[in-house]
Image: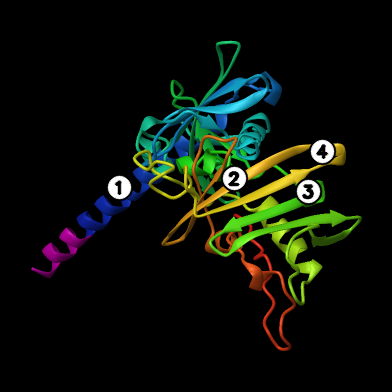
Amino acid sequence: MSGNKNLVAFVVLAALLGITVWQFKARDAEDQRAADVTVTLPKIKKEEVDELSIAAPEKPAVSFKKVDNKWRMTAPIDSDADSSAIDTALSKLAEFEVIGVAATKPESHAGLDLVEGKAIHVVAKGADKPLLDVLVGVYRSGNTIVREPKNDVAAVVKGSVRYAFDKVVKDWRDRTVSGLTADQVSAITFQNSEGTFNFVKEGSEWKQAPGDKKIPDFESGKIVSLVGTATSMRANDFATDEQTADSVGVGAKPVGKVTLTTSGDAGNQQVVLYVGNKRNDGYYLKNEAKAPIFVVSDFAGSRMLSGRDKFVKDPPGKHVEVNPIPKPKK
């Protein structure tokens, strides 16, 4: 009886050993094939690309086209594109450096996020011709796995790539509000329920405009800070398609109005900003010369509705408002 048990145990052990040896041989065979395989990707130059399309999982596909040397979003909406985001994406494509092979079989693609629903599909064109068509997969061990859709061989590309393409629609849009820098502004006017307040810059100092009612304890530095906010703020979001300028308070009867006047090297121009209703996470705001209705931060929007108390010296011990420093994106 004991001999039968030993025999059964021996048979089971032999079977398990056989399976293990087979697995190692299969893995070694696959590794050997992978080592023998090489893969290349087309080399492109940023300046050659004039069309770009990106389809990321669980996000609307986006398309861009260069018009008069400026990038524009063509889908899912027609809008100015964020030139910095496009430049980063194109730089990543142009810098592709293949340093190895990650897989050679289709059954390996899912685990590397190189299948539909997991991969980011990027197509770059130039002069109506495809320059690069690639699926961007996982970021692993400091590198990124990619492959061309018609090629089963997955390449290892040096560095982090996926983040440059994995964005929601609003992050691809141009979120610049005023288009000015603080040193270009020579006059600023605030109009809202508190009244109308005009300020001009004389040399490096801000003063009340001639003829305006004198503000007791006026402080020039407060205008410096407000001009900084008006020129540096960027949109956090955009109004929905259903919302109109009038419905969010930036139409014919805006909640507030800020007029920035330039001179000198910037030329003589005016940029008019309409400040609208408060949203739970900020304020609606529109540049008169631009189509989109922006949503700016609560901090920026409230400052664009500044009244007399925002232009005077702070009492001793009061916390001074400063423009918040945005956290860098990873």
Q: How many marks?
A: 4
Q: Earlier in the sequence, mark 2 or mark 3?
A: 2
Question: Pointer 2: what residue?
Answer: 143
What residue type is disc 3 on?
Val
Seen from this angle, which residue lies furthest left? 1
Q: CA distance from mark 1 to mark 2?
A: 33 Å
Determine crowd level at label 3: few under 14, some 14-19, many 20+ residues with C-alpha closer than 10 A: many
Q: Residue farthest to the top?
A: 128
Residue type beneath disc 1: Ile
The mark lying in front, picked from 1 and 4, is 4
Instruction: Estimate how packed mark 1 is, as few (under 14), some (14 to 19) or many (20 or more) residues with alpha carbons within 10 Å.
Output: few
Which residue is under mark 4?
266
How far is the residue under mark 2 from the one under mark 4?
44 Å
Range of residues picked out in magenta: 1-9
Q: Earlier in the sequence, mark 4 or mark 3?
A: 3
Q: Which residue is mark 3?
A: 185
Which residue is tagged 1? 19
Mark whose residue sits in front, 3 or 1:
3
The kind of secondary structure element at disc 1 is helix
The 10 Å Cα crowd at callout 2, few under 14, some 14 to 19, many 20 or more, is some
N-terminal of the two: label 1 or label 4? 1
> Which of these two is toward me, 225 or 53?
225
Picture coordinates of residue 300, whole percent (x, y): 59, 60
The question of residue 5 being in magenta is answered with yes
Q: Position of residue 10 (x, y in %)?
A: 23, 59
> Identity of the amino acid at label 2?
Asn
